[in-house]
Image (cartoon, rainbow, N blue to C red):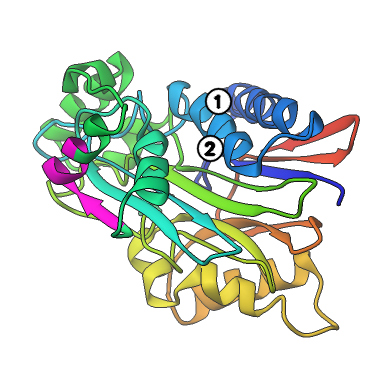
Amino acid sequence: MQPSLIVHGGAWDIPDDAVDACKAGCLRALHAGWTVLKNGGHALDAIEAAIIVLEDDPVFDAGYGSHLTLDGHVECDAIIMDAVTLRAGSVAGLRRVKNPIRAARAVLEKCAHMMLVSEGAEHFASQHGVSLCDPEELVSPAEREAWLRCKEDSHAAEHHRGHEQGTVGAVALDEQGRLYAATSTGGTCCKLPGRVGDSPLIGCGCYADEETGGVSSTGYGEAIMRVVMAKTATDFLRPSSSTPIRAAQAAVQLLAKRGKGAGGLILLDKRGNPGFAFNTPRMAYGYVKDATSFVASV
Ligand code: ASP
């Protein structure tokens, strides 16, 4: 099987001066994941490597540099899903894990449950080799500044212009035909403490099924949940007349029509063909075009 990889760095109104940084982040993530896949590595290692690059980059809303909650903390959510077993590892409300995707992987591989939240998730992660950090280590100066400005008045989106960020995600297929999808986020700016969006929810922020393909979503979580967007997009891959681009577009049209919201998604069909769509002004994404070249766009 020809390996394949697609990543995203969120679908919002990414300002002009953040475009290059978002593209560069997507390219670095592709490079990290592709290094694993091109050497015959496991799709799970590839997807984790790609997401870690995006989580560590403060231009994106995941891991370090996530948006802050109304009370000024970072609370991260993440998920990885295995298309063969339909099992997911999901975590939500993490305040002390630098790379939430590592915690999601620990749940996927070592837990009888599929989703853990808050202290329980952190405790499980640390018991399985994921080190915990000081919550302040996840706060970037730009996000603290934006949060302080949001506290002074309620024009949150405006305060984030100049360093607006998005959730991150990836879908990877390896040469053995193993397919995984993953999503990681700090959620929405000034969310209530304890708010969980679509991202770590199976079928909403992420879905993977070897019969159809794998998807990672981004955008307004409350709308994405209404239409269970990731699972819906994989179902749109089923008809033989479907293409990855058409399936992605149909899911985003449904998000707008029935979910009444904005967002986007990336996907790979079961053969590794990439697709993407968004109804926000921009989305950061990138994929491996052929074994030697990457495409990244915002
Ligand atoms: N979907 C995420 C959430 O609602 C946010 C995003 O994709 O940027 O938490």
- Nearer-the-camera pick, 13 or 178: 178
- Nearer-the-camera pick, 75 or 145: 75
The residue shown at (55%, 78%) is 254
Write down the residue under mark 2: 14
Please state which amino acid type lies under the numbered disc 2: Ile
Q: Which residues are magenta?
A: 115-123
The residue shown at (32%, 18%) is 142
The residue shown at (68%, 53%) is 178
Q: Residue 246 location, x and y as percent?
A: 76, 72
When the figure is inspected, residue 53 is found, relative to residue 277, above or below; the finding is above
53 horizontally vs 185: left or right: right
141 horizontally vs 276: left or right: left
- As helix, strand or loop, the secondary structure at mark 2 comes to loop
The total number of labels drawn is 2
109 horizontally vs 124: left or right: right
Please state which amino acid type lies under the numbered disc 1: Ala
Q: Quadrant of the C terminus?
A: top right
